[in-house]
Amino acid sequence: MADNSFRVEVVSADERLYSGDATTLVAQTTDGELGILAGHAPLLGQLTDGGYVAVTEADGTRRVAAVTGGFLSVSTDVVTVLAETAEWVESVDVAAETAALESAEAGTAAHLLAKSRLAASAALSR
């Protein structure tokens, strides 16, 4: 592991989505968007409902996951994302997700999932 990388684990209730080395991690929390680099001070944050987590792997590959709920834990050398739901977002049908967001009742699982997919899609295109 290079000096500027750290271990990342992204886990949902259903599966381990990611386990590997990264140089950056960005997560949407209830306190705002947090960027994590190697050597970050330990912290515990609550992930926002309908948000995303972006991981830049040690080889430079950028991956973004739509997440709903859960926690982010930063320790000395490991960042762990424990999400209620998480899925990688490679391509999103923005029109379909926008329609789903508009038709779903605010706060429902369908609403949060559509919101999360749209946020992750926007983050992926940055």
Image (cartoon, rainbow, N blue to C red):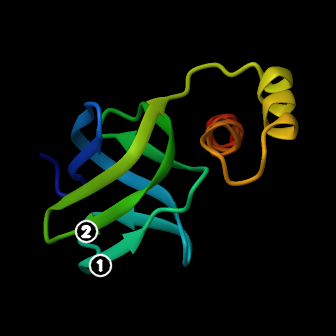
What is the quadrant of the N terminus in the image?
top left
Give whichever of 16, 101 is nearer the camera. Answer: 101
Residue to which mark 1 is pinned:
43
Identity, as a three-letter code, of the amino acid under mark 1: Leu
Q: Secondary structure at mark 2?
A: strand
Distance in Å between CA atoms under marks 2 and 1: 5 Å
Where is residue 43? Give x, y as percent: 29, 78
Q: Is residue 55 left or right of residue 8?
A: right
Residue 62 - label: none
Identity, as a three-letter code, of the amino acid under mark 2: Val
Measured along the vertical axis of the image, is residue 47 above or below residue 95?
Answer: below
Q: Is residue 100 left or right of residue 65?
A: right
Residue 33 appears in the rendering: yes
Give whichever of 99, 34 is nearer the camera. Answer: 99
Which residue is rendered at x = 86% and y = 29% of the image? 99
What is the quadrant of the C terminus in the image?
top right
